[in-house]
Each structure stands twice: as structure tokens, then as C-alpha cells.
Image: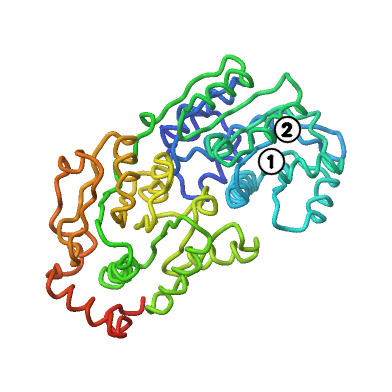
């Protein structure tokens, strides 16, 4: 199947070609015709499936088919997203796909000056991509008019609920015309998602491109059972020994992200932290450096990393396991995107054993344990399910490009590092 079978405008097809895309992904094949038909949609799609283009392309077509002469241009399409990073990602996608169309888009999110956003909104725009909080700031200041919105997109609706935005979402929806098209995209369909879908969507078409609550098949998952005090050292070893050029590392807290990034820098690994206390400029700079290869290890919290779009990201590491099992799926979904191969490694100490077992129950499969971590054994106590997991003898990161490192050699390296020479073991990346 090709994109020209959707009946998209020549200008949109030209932009798609310039992006190098040849054929639509499954979510695009299913969602685009439904959206073009003007129907509401309830779509289950995990990250990396092409869902952004799945709603962006038909929205551009619908707006282009219904030009307005009103000046300044009224907001006709509103896209709500949970984070500023995702807002920027969707904004850039719209700009790329709509570059040859006479349509205007504005991103509205916090962490930056509101004045430039106000100026652009006063000039008029067809599409607004917004986080709920900043959008309501504009509503309160009467700098945005939502009375003519014809299309509402709730992107990553499950994450917006997780982040406590439900009341803000209700306030926004109450400001919109009742006669509109609503498109809801979510990685999972919790009871809360189903409830708001029943309230806000009219006879929606259901689209599900992957089985609910499953991980991407292309991702190779492994667990290293290791004491907490040795996690950083093992992580540095894996990055250096495997010659990893790009790895996204998840930690639980903002302080933990800063601390680990500094420790990796001391190990000779170019690193940066990404979390909610960073300014928007600092977050954008860290992400840019990570994408262009100037930073090898990006250490992030869940909220900051949500919506990151990094092509061909080969490695994701759970330095700390998430407290909510569902977040594990979102985390490892950063790799293995659009069918590419990816690797997800979790460093698990015994006090996280229950979190691991909850994750395995959620994804309905055991995650292989690396039998020889090079450190003394760390039993993961707390569930009989641990006995059912078949261990793997060799970490894939070692086996691909290097001969496996024997456990006794690994332990001797650890002993040397404890004497203050850890940087000599891990090569600069």
C-alpha cells in the first residue's frame, strides 16, 4: 500500500516523499481513512508505530479541504499532549508534513515565555498543539479562542491521566463545540480511558494495531540481578565494553538522574540528565546533543522521556524499575521503533524484585535473566515465578562485537575499580 491511495493532496504527498517514507504503517493504514471520513476514533497504539503521522496527515487534508477567509485565522484543530517534548515533536511533524500547504501551527506549552505564544496566536493559526496547563493559561488570559475547533486530538491520553491532567482536560473539552471530531490515542485502554472515551467520543471507530498491554516483539529484553551499589559500575562496563553509541537510561528521581549523569561523566562517558526541573532550553539542548551523537548516555525520568522520538535508538536501560508496571512498556518502547531491533536491559536489585514480578505479570511473559553478571549472585526473592525464568549465559551486548568476558576477569576489574581505578576499565565513548 502507498500513501497516494488515501487521496491526500499532492502537497502532502510531496512532503511525505521528502521525509523518505514509502508506505504507511499499520496504524496509519487503519486510522487515516477513518479520520478522513470525519469519524471519531479510539486508537490503541504504542510508541514507534507512526501514530503521529496517523492523525497529522488526515488533519492537514481536512483543513486544506475547508479553507477559511476569516482573519486572523481561527483555531480549527486542537491537539492535547502530556509533555512539552511531545508537543514539540508533534509540532515539528505538522510543520514537516504541511510545509507546502497554506496552514499555520502553533505549539503552546509551559517552561518558556508566554509572550511569543500570545503574539503568534494573535496573528492566527489553524492548528494548536498544547499541554493542558499552558493552554488553560491562555484561556484565562483570553489569548486563545477555542469556539471554532472542529477537530480534537487527545494524544497519549493514558499518560495525561497518569500525570493528573484529567481535570484540566475536562475544562478544555467543556470549552469546545459539541459538534466536533475527536481522536483519542492511547497505548493502553484502562477503565479511565474507556470512561472518557464514552463521554467525549461519538460512535468511535476502534483501531488496535498491537495486542493490549504487550511489548514490542523486536525488543530483546534482559534482566541483570545485581546489588544496588554495583549498578553504576556494571552500566559503565556495558556501555564501554559494548561500544554503545546511544543509550537512554531511566531512573526514578530527578536527583538520581543528575547524580548518575555526573558519575557516568567521571567514567569517561558523555552523559546528560533530562528531568522536569531542567529549563526548557536545557532539556532541548540535552535531547539535541543526544540525537546528534554528542551525548552517549541520556539519563531521564519517566515524565521527561515521555514522547521522545529518537530514530534507531539501540539501547534502553532501566537503572531503576518503574513503580507502575505499565510504565515499563512505555520505557522500552523508546527502542525497537517502527520494526527496528532494540535492546532493553533492566538492572534489578532484590528490593525491586516485587516490581519486576509485577512487570512480568503485566506483559504476560518472563524476562530472561543474565546468569553470569560478573558479580556475586543477587537472588530476586518474592515470587515463585522467578524459578520459571530461563537464564541466559551471555549478555547480548557482549556477544555481538566482543568475546564474552569471564566472570573472574569481570570481578577482578570490579575489585580494581574499588581501589579507585574504575575509569581505567571503562573506555571513553
Q: Position of residue 14 (x, y in %)?
A: 56, 44
Q: Nearer the viewer, residue 58 or 350?
A: 350
Q: Secondary structure at mark 2?
A: helix
Q: Quadrant of residue 81?
A: top right
**Residue depicted at 46% across the width and 45% down the height:** 21
Q: Quadrant of residue 395?
A: bottom left
Q: Is residue 316 left or right of residue 223?
A: right
Q: Residues within 10 Å of mark 2 (few under 14, many from 20)?
A: some
Look at the image and tell me in which quarter the C terminus lies: bottom left
Q: Quadrant of residue 112?
A: bottom right
Q: Position of residue 235 (x, y in %)?
A: 32, 66
**Residue depicted at 25% across the width and 72% down the height:** 241
Q: Nearer the viewer, residue 133 or 22?
A: 133
Q: Position of residue 379 (x, y in %)?
A: 20, 53
Disc 2 from disc 1: Cα separation: 7 Å
Q: Is residue 214 left or right of residue 273?
A: left
Q: Is residue 326 left or right of residue 157?
A: left
With respect to residue 33, does 217 lie above or below? below
**Residue depicted at 55% across the width and 18% down the height:** 204
Q: Earlier in the sequence, mark 2 or mark 1?
A: 1
With respect to residue 275, does 46 lie above or below? above
Q: Disc 2, disc 1: CB below 8 Å?
A: yes
Q: Which mark is residue 172?
A: 2
| Residue 316 in sight here | no
Look at the image and tell me in which quarter the N terminus lies: top left
Q: Which mark is residue 132?
A: 1
| Residue 279 in sight here | yes
Amino acid at each position: 500500500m502507498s500513501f497516494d491511495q488515501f487521496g491526500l493532496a499532492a502537497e502532502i504527498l510531496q512532503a511525505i516523499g521528502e521525509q523518505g517514507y514509502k508506505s504507511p504503517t499499520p496504524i496509519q493504514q487503519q486510522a487515516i481513512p477513518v479520520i478522513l471520513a470525519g469519524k471519531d476514533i479510539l486508537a490503541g497504539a504504542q510508541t514507534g508505530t507512526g501514530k503521529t503521522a496517523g492523525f497529522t496527515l488526515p488533519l492537514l487534508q481536512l483543513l486544506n479541504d475547508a479553507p477559511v477567509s476569516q482573519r486572523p485565522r481561527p483555531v480549527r484543530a486542537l491537539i492535547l499532549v502530556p509533555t512539552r517534548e511531545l508537543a514539540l515533536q508533534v509540532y515539528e511533524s505538522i510543520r514537516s508534513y504541511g510545509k507546502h500547504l497554506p496552514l499555520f501551527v502553533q505549539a503552546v506549552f509551559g517552561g518558556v515565555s508566554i509572550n511569543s505564544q500570545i503574539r503568534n496566536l494573535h496573528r492566527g493559526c489553524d492548528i494548536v498543539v498544547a499541554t493542558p496547563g499552558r493552554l488553560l493559561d491562555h484561556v484565562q488570559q483570553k489569548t486563545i479562542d477555542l469556539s471554532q475547533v472542529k477537530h480534537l486530538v487527545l494524544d497519549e491520553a493514558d499518560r495525561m491521566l497518569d500525570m493528573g491532567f484529567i481535570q484540566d482536560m475536562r475544562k478544555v473539552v467543556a470549552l469546545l463545540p459539541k459538534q466536533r471530531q475527536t481522536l483519542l490515542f492511547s497505548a493502553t485502554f484502562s477503565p479511565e480511558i474507556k470512561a472518557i472515551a464514552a463521554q467525549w467520543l461519538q460512535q468511535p471507530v476502534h483501531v488496535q494495531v498491537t495486542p493490549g498491554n504487550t511489548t514490542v516483539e523486536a525488543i530483546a529484553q534482559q534482566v541483570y540481578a545485581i546489588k544496588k551499589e554495583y549498578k553504576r559500575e556494571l552500566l559503565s562496563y556495558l556501555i564501554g565494553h559494548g561500544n554503545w553509541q546511544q543509550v537512554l537510561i531511566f531512573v526514578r528521581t530527578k536527583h538520581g538522574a543528575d547524580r548518575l549523569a555526573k558519575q557516568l561523566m567521571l567514567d569517561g562517558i558523555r552523559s546528560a540528565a533530562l528531568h522536569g526541573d531542567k529549563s526548557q532550553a536545557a532539556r532541548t539542548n540535552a535531547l539535541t546533543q543526544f540525537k546528534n551523537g554528542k551525548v552517549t548516555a541520556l539519563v531521564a525520568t519517566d515524565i521527561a522521556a515521555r514522547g521522545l522520538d529518537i530514530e534507531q535508538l539501540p539501547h534502553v536501560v532501566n537503572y531503576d524499575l518503574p513503580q507502575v508496571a505499565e510504565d515499563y512498556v512505555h520505557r522500552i518502547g523508546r527502542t525497537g521503533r517502527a520494526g527496528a531491533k532494540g535492546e532493553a536491559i533492566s538492572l534489578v536489585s532484590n528490593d525491586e524484585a516485587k516490581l519486576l514480578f509485577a512487570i512480568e505479570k503485566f506483559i504476560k511473559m518472563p524476562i530472561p535473566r543474565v546468569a553470569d553478571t560478573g558479580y556475586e549472585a543477587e537472588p530476586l526473592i518474592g515470587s515463585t515465578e522467578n524459578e520459571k525464568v530461563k537464564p541466559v549465559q551471555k549478555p547480548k551486548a557482549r556477544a555481538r562485537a566482543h568475546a564474552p568476558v569471564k566472570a573472574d576477569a569481570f570481578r577482578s576489574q570490579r575489585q580494581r575499580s574499588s581501589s579507585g581505578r574504575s575509569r581505567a576499565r571503562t573506555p571513553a565513548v
